[in-house]
Image (cartoon, rainbow, N blue to C red):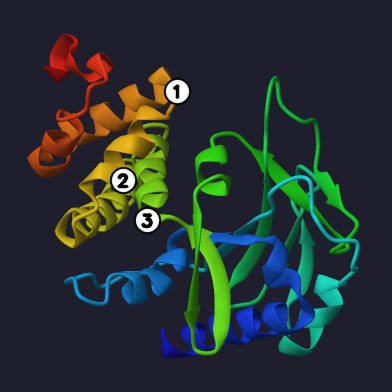
Amino acid sequence: MEEQCDLFLKVLTKFHSSGVLDNVVLIGSWSTYFYKDYFSAQNYYPTIKTTDMDFLVPLPIKTNKKVDIAELLRPDDFKVIFSNSGFIQLEHPGLTIEFLVPEHGKGTKGPFILPQFGISAQPLKMLDILAQNTIAIESNGIKVTVPHPAAYGLHKLIVSQRRTSKEKMLKDQESGLSVLHALIEKGESDTIKTMFNKLLPSWREKVLDALTKYDDQDVMRVLKQTENIEIHRGRHR
């Protein structure tokens, strides 16, 4: 784990020095590495058990500066791998780096080319909540943009309901809930409620389904304080 963390920080340092970090959002489980600074006064300890290091690229990209990411990471033994769908992954025995872009409407066919970085990204749905709600955290001399913890937590609950693997579903739920509980302890319940109310109705339902399945009364209690009557109908009353 220590070697993996060192590699993670080395990648971020290179992205910081080259300007890549100015135009991407670190998402996924590795973003929780920086939440320990956000929750310095709370009992929050991230548990990262993945080799996937994901970066969200908000569109449109606001830079014309070109950085060949594959060449940047070549000295660290990252190899370019093309997925079956055509998008690029950078693979190392300790980490797999992937770039994502928000997918809208009926979807984008094939990979999304990012000429600024010399790579292609994978379009995915339900990333807007992460792209539109971010914070910047500085640690180890690196300033990284990550999803606001409320966005991260709610997104994990939404995604958990799309999982076909029970193990992955529980992993997403536990990761999301641990962050939401830390926010409640920090006194930011209102932030959770505000962000929840901005979600599409179908997304709110997925959040509530996850809370019901996990029987998490603490977060459910926070959401039931909202004026949004959607959460009071049906089995969520």
Expressed as whole percent of the image width and height from the top left, the position of residue 169 reads: 33, 43
Expressed as whole percent of the image width and height from the top left, the position of residue 70 reads: 82, 73
Expressed as whole percent of the image width and height from the top left, the position of residue 76 reads: 72, 87
Q: Is residue 200 above or below residue 137?
A: above
The quarter in which the C terminus is drawn is top left
Q: What element carries label 3?
A: helix
Type of the residue with mark 1: Leu
Which of label 2 and label 1 is nearer to you? 2
Check residue 200 in the rendering and tell me which mark sits there, or answer none: 1
The residue shown at (33%, 36%) is 194
For disc 3, the marked residue is 149
Q: Quadrant of residue 200?
A: top left
The residues tagged by marks 3 and 1 sit, at their Cα atoms, a distance apart of 19 Å
Which of label 3 and label 2 is nearer to you? 2
Q: Earlier in the sequence, mark 2 or mark 1?
A: 2
Q: Quadrant of residue 90?
A: bottom right
Check residue 191 in the rendering and tell me which mark sits there, or answer none: 2
The residue shown at (67%, 34%) is 103
Q: Can I make out residue 213 in this image? A: no
Q: Would residue 217 be found to the left or right of residue 81 on screen? A: left
Q: Is mark 1 on a helix, strand or loop?
A: loop
Check residue 98 in the rendering and tell me which mark sits there, or answer none: none
Q: Is mark 2 on a helix, strand or loop?
A: helix
Expressed as whole percent of the image width and height from the top left, the position of residue 29 reads: 43, 62
